[in-house]
Structures are given as structure tokens and as C-alpha cells.
Image (spheres, rainbow, N blue to C red):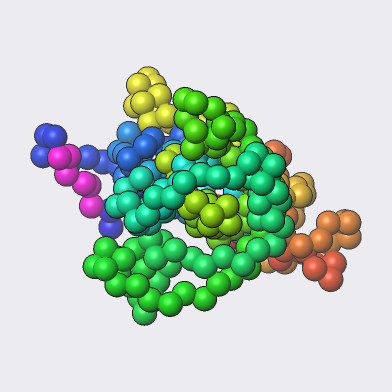
């Protein structure tokens, strides 16, 4: 049984609605991913919502939010590549690797532009990275950042991640105005910590470094250019018009079209004989309506995750 929620402003009961789709949100600075999700959920007056992976409060940018039946596909982006624009301050290391932490050490900046470019090449490809204490990874059920806040540090095992590319967007390291700052675009695999990458690059240059700003501009095939702000969502006369299709997060998968009989069988959970060329995970449609996902193997189509928009 769905119990109506109480409005904090009026104390009256608010009837939530079945809202289905995706909001590609440009998360503002200072909001946690959960803060942004709950704000959007209230604006849309939605019953069910979820996000596709956290983005730090000090980071801005692309945060896909799922509503209703779209939450069934929220895990599909967890393994996707991400792209960030990171502003790095050389010469200063801080607790946690960003502006929130206390200064640990200050060192002179002596590297040349050529040395910086050479170091960036060293951090491209598969690298070993030690997860930071200020992360959501858990040790015996406790997030590492909670331990870090108590001054507790535990050993972490380095793990392999892949940095597909590191592009120097803005290099002001050798001007008089901001002699210590660069902006990098980093295209990375899942599980890559940009603050750790910045710190490691700084150590390789012998001066240390920390993040002063971080913006996520892509998750898988989704781009920041498609995103909207919370303010836009709030001010829209019909916020549900901002929703993208339920299958937005799985749009990269091959699509197969079913006839009426095939669609009815699949919706009942039955598998089909399949003679098409597709293999693996696919989207299934009937009359251009998205039905869910199926897995094709050994000439059989087996429904794996179906949606119900009724």
C-alpha cells in the first residue's frame, strides 16, 4: 500500500505519481547525488526514483536520474566510461586531494611544459591506482570516507584502471596570472578516481597537486549537452516534459522488433526461437514501444528485464 507523503511546507499529504523516464541532470556544486535526486523527485512528484552512480558534492555535471520503470536499468551505466574536466592546482597537497582538505605540504613548481606532457603520457593507458580514503568504498560495511573523517586510515589495495586519454585543455602553468593551474579532460574507465589521478600526477612532477574543480561531461554515450539544471526542471510548466525515454540508458544496445504474437509471449516471460543475427543483450520493441531487455543466445531470445508502464 502506498502511503501519501507529508509536505514539509504545508503538512498536507502529497499524492505521488507513477512517473517513468530519465532526467539527465547537470548537478550543481554542493549537492550530493542523493540531494539532487530527492530534489528532482519532489519537483516531478514521483513515487520511485534512483540515480546511476554518485558524483561528489564538490563536482558538477552529468548525473542521470531514473524514475519509475527506468530505475530497472540504473545499473547499466555503472560499468561505463566517464569523461571529466578537472582543474588541477600544482604545488600544494591537501587532505582528501581537493579544496575541502587542510593543506599538507607546499612545494615549488619546477617542471616545464614538456615534462608535464611527458608525465601525462605516463598516466595514459592501464595504470595501477590506490583508492583514496575519501571514497564510498566500504570496509566491513563502513564507507572509507566515514573512517577518514574520524582520522582513521586503513591499507587499500591498488587496482588496475584505464585512462583512455588525458588532454590538456588549458595550460596556464607558465603564465604570470595563475602559474600553478591546468585543466585536463580525462576519459577514464569505471572506478577511476580523478582526485587520486591529480595527486599522482603532482607527485610524478615532484611538486604535489590537488583538485580545485571537477566537472563530469559524459557517462557512456550520454553527454552534458543533453542535460538540464534543477532550476530549469523547477521552472518548467510541466516538469514531466523534461523526461527522456525509459530506454535512454540502454540506447546503445541493439534493438529487435517483435510482432504481435512474439510480443505477447515475451510479456508473459516466455522465450522465443530466434533466427536473427543479433547476439547478447538487446532492447526489444513492439510497434516502436520499448518492452524491456532480452538476451539472445543459441538461437533463443530470453526476456531478462521487462517494463510495465500501466
Percent across and percent down for residue 225 are 58, 29
The answer to whether residue 242 is left or right of residue 259 is left
Query: Would residue 301 be counted in the magenta stretch?
Result: no
Which stretch is magenta? 3-8
Residue in the image at 64% along x and 45% along y: 116
Magenta segment main secondary structure: loop
Residue in the image at 21% along x and 46% along y: 5
User: In this picture, is 116 found above or below 154?
Assistant: above
The answer to whether residue 9 is left or right of residue 16 is left
Q: Is residue 224 visible?
A: no
Percent across and percent down for residue 76 are 59, 56
Number of marks in picture: 0
In the orientation shown, which residue stands out farthest toward the left?
11
Of the pair 27 and 271, the residue shown nearer to us: 27
Query: Would residue 5 be counted in the magenta stretch?
Result: yes
In the orientation shown, which residue stands out farthest toward the bottom?
140
Q: Is residue 133 visible?
A: yes
What quarter of the picture does the N terminus occupy?
bottom left
Residue in the image at 59% along x and 40% along y: 184
Percent across and percent down for residue 62 are 51, 39
The answer to whether residue 153 is left or right of residue 25 is left
Percent across and percent down for residue 129 are 57, 65
The answer to whether residue 73 is left or right of residue 231 is right
Of the pair 273 and 142, the residue shown nearer to us: 142
Residue in the image at 85% along x and 67% along y: 299
Amino acid at each position: 500500500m502506498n502511503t501519501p507523503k507529508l509536505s514539509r511546507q504545508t503538512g498536507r499529504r502529497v499524492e505521488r505519481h507513477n512517473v517513468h523516464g530519465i532526467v539527465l541532470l547537470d548537478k550543481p556544486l554542493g549537492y550530493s547525488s542523493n540531494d539532487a535526486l530527492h530534489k528532482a523527485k519532489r519537483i516531478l512528484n514521483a513515487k520511485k526514483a534512483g540515480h546511476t552512480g554518485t558524483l561528489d558534492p564538490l563536482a558538477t555535471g552529468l548525473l542521470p536520474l531514473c524514475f519509475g520503470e527506468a530505475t530497472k536499468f540504473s545499473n547499466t551505466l555503472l560499468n561505463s566510461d566517464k569523461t571529466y574536466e578537472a582543474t588541477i592546482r600544482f604545488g600544494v597537497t591537501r587532505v582528501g586531494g581537493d579544496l575541502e582538505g587542510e593543506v599538507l605540504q607546499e612545494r615549488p613548481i619546477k617542471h616545464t611544459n614538456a615534462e608535464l606532457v611527458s608525465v601525462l603520457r605516463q598516466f595514459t593507458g592501464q595504470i595501477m591506482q590506490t583508492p583514496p580514503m575519501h571514497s564510498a568504498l566500504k570496509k566491513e560495511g563502513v564507507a572509507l570516507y566515514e573512517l577518514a573523517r574520524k582520522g582513521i586510515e586503513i591499507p587499500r589495495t591498488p587496482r588496475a584502471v584505464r585512462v583512455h586519454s588525458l588532454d590538456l585543455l588549458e595550460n596556464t602553468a607558465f603564465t604570470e596570472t595563475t602559474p600553478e593551474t591546468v585543466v585536463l579532460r580525462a576519459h577514464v574507465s569505471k572506478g577511476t578516481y580523478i582526485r587520486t589521478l591529480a595527486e599522482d600526477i603532482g607527485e610524478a612532477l615532484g611538486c604535489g597537486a590537488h583538485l580545485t574543480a571537477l566537472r563530469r561531461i559524459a557517462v557512456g554515450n550520454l553527454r552534458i549537452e543533453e542535460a538540464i539544471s534543477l532550476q530549469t526542471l523547477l521552472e518548467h510548466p510541466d516538469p514531466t516534459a523534461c523526461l527522456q525515454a525509459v530506454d535512454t540508458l540502454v540506447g546503445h544496445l541493439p534493438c529487435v522488433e517483435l510482432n504481435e504474437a512474439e510480443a505477447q509471449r515475451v510479456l508473459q516471460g516466455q522465450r522465443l526461437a530466434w533466427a536473427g543475427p543479433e547476439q547478447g543483450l538487446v532492447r526489444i520493441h513492439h510497434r516502436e514501444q520499448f518492452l524491456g531487455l532480452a538476451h539472445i543466445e543459441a538461437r533463443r531470445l530470453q526476456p531478462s528485464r521487462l517494463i510495465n508502464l500501466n
